[in-house]
């Protein structure tokens, strides 16, 4: 990137606000999921009662089922009068049985008390309002139906408080009636349940138990039902009982004031906010369940497709095809362009590896793009007539390549990054596909030279498992989107036909490749042409490099978007290649942080064994595919041990790169050029590799 271009891009700052937005959004989403998991999956709730350690006090055992006041072990109670039945229903509102029960009660001109769960009331506010509109009464049965006697102090307070807020937001009421879950008659309020009942009574609640189901309605009856088909049938029978004259609510039956009282405006809005959060969490979890399923299916499909197409690529190379035309060996002279800006650490190794090529007919043109170090001097001091150094003011990589292209002596041009080391036979192998007259460009096989650290191993896996396996698939589908700047061969007339290397994007290699497709040229992959490159050694450098790559790729995709409606090779490339990039390198990474968050939610609140099983199965498929990719590239399998750790750190970093790139592009932010500090380790470590291993990898 030129200094002028650097200044031009530097005028706009990198987007910072979206990081604050992301930092705020993800915790909010996690809080919503946490609340959803707490309510739906009842985290921290005792789902069964603890056994009673002592019986209920005698005054309670002899009392009526409605406990209006509790003072120590003394209670003030009430019961339904003769021939009066207070119908009560626990749980719900249930979208299936609550409406049917309401219809049945209306048919018999009867009223009842519905003890609802706050979580269900938040999900079905219309049923809560219908209950009240038809003259029935609302009571609380806690928020999730947790056993209050076994709940922690925090859980106890939230079970009652959240239900109260939910009813305030749903129907604008406050109820003082409480039926403790997992209780029926008053003698079930024993042990810890009695202590919980006393605490609830101290908060102003009237506790409602029930009479035994066998009690004759002629003596007065408070009857407890659930909301099921059995409850519906038993209610129907009870409504026809000749021993009962009146079917009413609990408060009406015992002569109490109505339990449902209006709330203040502030309380109502607090309740609405709670209900909105519950509704949002419920909707979000349902959506994310589908998104997680689709993302998982697409990810699995991608892995399987890569493997299948890689196998097809191998068969294409190893099996002769009847009727295939015989192509001549390409021995034409080659011009190698090496654009360089402050590359003194690796320029000499790069040029000497090119001069050591088994293809002797070449010239190496080093275009020094205004370096401030000894890059040009080191290239000039190489005593070989095949090396030519061009110096120019700093104008950027694309301009440097165009300068070299204008001065190229030969019809075949190879573009090389100044930190790349070629295998001796790489140049010869790279140009062989150009024997076919329809091929305009060839991508080589880029490998990581400095792979000793954990970050280097992760990038090594990405190059072999990601980039190179992708390229095999792209060639089979005839939609190669990028000839990497590290190693690529071109026809000079093809380059000139598209106007040379464009400066419109920061991914000039991707932009150029797409332009060649649109001009009617084919782009192929030659996996036996191996070059070694130096990758970033710190997360900061990696972030900057991938940010530029991703941002530039998005620019190129947008620039060539109209190719989707074109015909021939251009349309085929766009509909396959651009669609693949859009789905797997843009859309899925954008969803990935939320998907990962939802996966954690599933492990914490749903079924951790199932979540771990799915994750391990997916990891196993990835390891198998990565092992196959390493085998195809002649690499050792022992590096696979680092792959599980890659999923926790490296993958998240790549996702954030995509997020920032998309946001920057949408906001129209001009990206600064970030240059990686070179150390020349790619050449050093490559030279240390055993000769047998180098030969294996170059097959």
Image (tube, grey):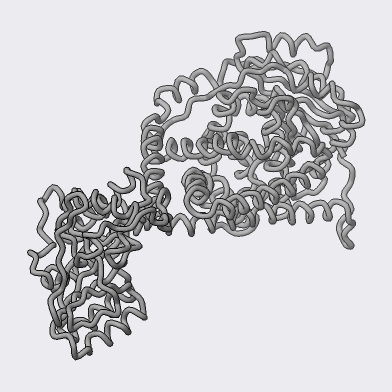
Q: Which residue ends up furthest to the front in the rendered image? A: 58
Q: Nearer the viewer, residue 420 or 440?
A: 420
Could you tell me which residue is drawn at 83 percent across and 27 percent down? Answer: 362
Q: Judge left or right: residue 466 versus residue 233.
A: right
Q: In the shown orientation, is residue 436 left or right of residue 287?
A: right
Q: State the image coordinates of residue 425 (x, y, percent, origin top left).
A: 87, 32
Q: Answer left or right for 500 relative to 97.
A: right
Q: Which residue is drawn at 72% across and 17% down?
A: 680
* Left or right: 31 in relation to 563: left
Q: Can residue 502 be seen in this view?
A: no
What x and y, as percent, mark residue 420? Answer: 73, 25
Q: Quadrant of residue 305?
A: bottom right
Can you say which quadrant of the picture contains the C terminus?
Answer: top right
Q: In which quarter of the image is the N terminus?
A: top right
Say if residue 333 shows up in the picture: yes
Q: Which of 286 and 487 is in front in this view?
A: 286
């Amino acid at each position: 990137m030129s200094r002028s271009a650097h200044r031009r891009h530097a005028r706009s700052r990198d987007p910072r606000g979206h990081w604050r937005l992301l930092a705020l959004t993800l915790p909010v989403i996690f809080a919503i999921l946490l609340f959803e998991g707490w309510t739906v999956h009842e985290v921290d709730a005792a789902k069964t009662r603890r056994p009673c350690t002592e019986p209920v006090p005698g005054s309670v055992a002899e009392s009526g089922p409605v406990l209006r006041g509790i003072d120590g072990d003394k209670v003030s109670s009430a019961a339904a009068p003769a021939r009066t039945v207070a119908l009560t229903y626990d749980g719900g509102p249930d979208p299936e049985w609550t409406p049917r029960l309401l219809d049945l009660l209306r048919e018999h001109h009867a009223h009842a008390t519905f003890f609802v769960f706050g979580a269900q009331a938040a999900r079905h506010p219309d049923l809560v309002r219908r209950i009240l509109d038809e003259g029935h009464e609302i009571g609380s049965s806690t928020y999730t139906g947790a056993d209050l006697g076994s709940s922690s102090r925090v859980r106890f307070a939230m079970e009652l408080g959240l239900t109260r807020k939910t009813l305030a937001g749903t129907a604008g009421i406050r109820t003082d009636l409480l039926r403790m879950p997992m209780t029926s008659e008053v003698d079930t309020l024993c042990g810890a349940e009695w202590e919980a009942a006393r605490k609830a009574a101290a908060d102003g609640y009237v506790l409602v138990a029930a009479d035994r189901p066998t009690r004759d309605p002629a003596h007065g009856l408070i009857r407890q039902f659930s909301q099921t088909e059995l409850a519906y049938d038993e209610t129907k029978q009870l409504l026809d009982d000749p021993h009962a004259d009146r079917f009413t609510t609990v408060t009406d039956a015992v002569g109490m004031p109505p339990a449902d009282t209006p709330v203040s405006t502030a309380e109502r809005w607090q309740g609405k906010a709670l209900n909105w959060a519950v509704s949002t969490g419920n909707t979000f979890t349902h959506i994310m369940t589908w998104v997680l399923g689709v993302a998982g299916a697409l990810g699995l499909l991608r892995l399987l497709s890569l493997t299948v197409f890689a196998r097809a690529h191998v068969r294409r190379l190893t099996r002769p095809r009847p009727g295939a035309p015989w192509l001549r060996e390409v021995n034409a002279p080659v011009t190698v362009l090496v654009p360089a800006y402050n590359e003194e650490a690796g320029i000499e190794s790069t040029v000497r590896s090119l001069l050591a090529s088994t293809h002797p007919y070449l010239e190496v043109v080093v275009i020094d793009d205004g370096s401030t170090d000894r890059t040009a001097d080191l290239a000039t001091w190489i005593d070989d007539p095949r090396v030519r150094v061009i110096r120019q003011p700093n104008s950027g990589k694309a301009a440097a390549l165009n300068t070299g292209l204008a001065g190229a002596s030969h019809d075949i041009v190879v573009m090389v990054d100044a930190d790349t080391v070629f295998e001796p036979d790489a140049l010869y192998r790279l140009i062989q596909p150009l024997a076919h007259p329809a091929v305009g460009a060839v991508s080589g096989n880029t490998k990581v030279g400095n792979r000793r650290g954990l970050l280097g191993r992760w990038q090594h896996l990405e190059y072999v498992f990601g980039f190179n396996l992708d390229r095999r698939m792209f060639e089979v589908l005839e939609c190669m989107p990028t000839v990497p700047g590290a190693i690529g061969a071109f026809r000079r007339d093809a380059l000139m036909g598209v106007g040379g290397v464009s400066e419109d994007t920061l991914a000039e290699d991707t932009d150029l490749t797409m332009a060649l497709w649109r001009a009617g040229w084919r782009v192929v992959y030659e996996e036996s042409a191996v070059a070694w490159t130096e990758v970033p050694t710190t997360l900061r450098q990696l972030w900057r490099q991938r940010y530029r790559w991703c941002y530039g790729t998005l620019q190129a995709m947008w620039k060539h978007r109209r190719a989707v409606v074109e015909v021939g090779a251009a349309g085929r490339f766009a509909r396959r290649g651009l669609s693949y990039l859009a789905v797997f390198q843009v859309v899925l990474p954008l969803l990935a942080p939320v998907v990962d968050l939802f996966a954690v939610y599933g492990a914490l609140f749903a079924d951790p064994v199932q979540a771990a099983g799915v994750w391990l199965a997916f990891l196993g498929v990835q390891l198998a595919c990565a092992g196959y990719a390493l085998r195809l590239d002649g690499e050792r399998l022992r590096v696979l041990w680092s792959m599980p750790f890659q999923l926790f750190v490296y993958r998240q970093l790549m996702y954030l790169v995509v997020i920032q790139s998309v946001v920057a592009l949408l906001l129209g932010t001009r990206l600064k050029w970030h240059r990686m500090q070179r150390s020349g380790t790619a050449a050093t470590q490559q030279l240390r590799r055993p000769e047998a291993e180098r030969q294996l990898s170059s097959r």
